[in-house]
Amino acid sequence: MDEVHQQDAQQRAGAPAGRATATEPGAGPVPGPVTGPDPAAASAPEPGPGPGGPAGLVRSSGAMAAGTVVSRALGFLRNVVIVAALGSATVGDAFALANAVPNVLFTLIAGGLLNAVFVPQLVRAMTAGEEEGRAYADRLLTLAVLVLAGVTLVATLAAPLVVRLYAGGELSPADLRLSTAFAYWCLPQIFFYGLYTLLGQVLNARGSFGPMMWTPILNNLVAIATGLLFIAVATVGPRDSGSLDGGEIALLGAGTTLGIVVQALALVPVLRRVGYRYRPRLDLRGSGLGRAGSLAKWTLAYVGVTQLAYLVVVRLTTDAGKLVAEQGGPGSGYLAYQNAYLMLLLPHSIITVSVVTALLPRMSRQAVQGDLRSVRDDLSHGLRLVGVVLVPASVLFLLLGPELGAALFSFGEASVEDGLAIGRVLSAFALGLVPFSAHYLVLRGFYALEDTRTPFLLAALIAALDVGAALVAYSVLPAEHKTVGVAAAYALAYVVGFVVSALTLRRRVGGLDGHRVLRTYVRLAVAALVAGLLAWAVLEAVRALMPEGSYAGVVLGLALSLPLAAVTYVLAARRMRVREVTRLTGQLRARLGR
């Protein structure tokens, strides 16, 4: 489940998930598409040209999105395999917690810093010339690798303390022992997440966006193979933490970490192909890293605030899962929250992360040149483009969330009720999908302007809202709905956070083309609502003809309703002359034709 957490952690921190963020490499966070640039471009004094206007952005984002679609599809399959192997109760929560910790710690210490600060700084260094950019990247890699190695060693040695910090007080000693045993195998992922992020950002700054989005596929393949092997050799009691022996724990933990290793090392030959060969350098004084360090202090504070909020979320959902398990109910704890979040991130990862990855180097160059009008135009187009996918996804998740959860996660040790519980959490998340992704995009405007203080203040606001609302929801809702309430709190926090972040950036860049963006979103919402209600009606009609609680009824209903909804949405949006839909469908037809 590392992809969920890297993207969750990175995107809470405003960083691209590989994620995702997610993101998320691996499962991932974030965190997270793609044909690379002409290798000859690597020798140019400036990085790759980036998208050239709306059509270019659609092409670049579409290419990256292709890698994300494959990666996320395999990520879903991996999570289905893990849920089938462990269930979604106590044992599944123990593994999910241990596998989340390295993502969270990596993001807390370095992830947001590397993503949000160093891409603009790498772009700035490369505009001074190829040699200057190469030397800066060498020094950055050397320093970061040393720091990551030290952090990984300390965190692994402190695994019992780290797990106890995130687990809270409701887990039994047996549950804590199982999570800690998994954590010893998973915590070395910190180093390889860092290496993956560093190498990927060097590629991004040089105009090569694709490889960082495709290599998570290797991670997912390794993880799927590991999960299937585990199912073949292990017998699990989903609510019995003592049902796994040391060999079974090692198989699942080591196989999961191996996927992250493969994901990171796969970028090394790509760097050579674009003309970059790393040379360790310790001459850090006067190298320009001091400026990045100055910018980084606010980013580190940002990540710290968001991760404190995430710590509360992990504890609340873990405790909720324990309470539901004691009552014999379906899995409704941390693993349910995690899997619902993975489903939520799918459209975000396909479109928003792809658009942001293409836009950030471009906007950074524009900001260095003082061209705020171009920054504003790119943000406006980016917001309208991501809405084409995010608005209908949000409506479908809201209306069909339980059925989607049941269709994807009702295998092996997990029942249909377990899948429905995951889907109910997804429905609670749904209202926050659009503001979450829009906020993620708006933050790139601040980072392009080399402003890391404002994102910290926004993060503090969102974290406070998230924690406050989550605590209220946890205290007033019954056990089976506590995790749903925590997810709804997350959505509410990002609704408010996006409004504040957009108004703040609007003053900085002279506007965000708000009337045009809002008009586009209203049209998309009307088209999505028509399509979503039609899909819901078809699904309910099919389920009424099948036995109550039938898995086949859910799958058949979705198989009939989702394609119908997609066609209805596209036709309705085109009828209302939403240009972004026309561009995307035209690009898709062209690619399919080729």
Image (tube, rainbow, N blue to C red):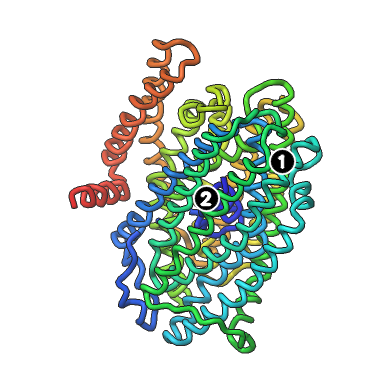
Whichever of callouts 2 and 1 sits on the residue coming sooner in the sequence is: 2
Q: Residue at x 50, y 36 (%)?
A: 81
Q: Position of residue 131 (x, y in %)?
A: 45, 87
Q: Position of residue 94 (x, y in %)?
A: 68, 39
Q: How far apart are the alpha carbons under marks 2 and 1?
A: 22 Å
Indicate left or right for 148 with 416 as reference.
Answer: right
Q: Residue at x 50, y 46 (%)?
A: 223
Q: Position of residue 380 (x, y in %)?
A: 42, 58
Q: Are marks 2 and 1 in contact (CB under 8 Å)?
A: no
Q: Which residue is mark 1?
A: 178
Q: Position of residue 47 (x, y in %)?
A: 39, 76
SS at circle 1? helix
Q: Which residue is mark 2?
A: 28
Amino acid carrying label 1: it is Leu
Q: Which mark is residue 443?
A: none
Q: How many labels were placed on the picture?
A: 2
Look at discs 2 and 1 and give the one toward the viewer.
Answer: 1
Whether residue 107 is visible, yes or no, is no
- Farthest residue toward the left? 593
Indicate left or right for 369 with 300 as reference.
Answer: left
Q: Residue at x 47, y 82 (%)?
A: 134
Whether residue 357 is visible, yes or no, is yes
Using the image, determine if residue 535 lies above or below residue 60.
above
- Residues 438 and 214: in front is 214
Using the image, determine if residue 461 lies above or below residue 236.
below
* Displayed quadrant of residue 174: top right
* Displayed quadrant of residue 561: top left
* Mark 2 Cα-neighbour bin, 10 Å: few <14, some 14–19, many ≥20: many
SS at circle 2? loop
* Mark 1 Cα-neighbour bin, 10 Å: few <14, some 14–19, many ≥20: many
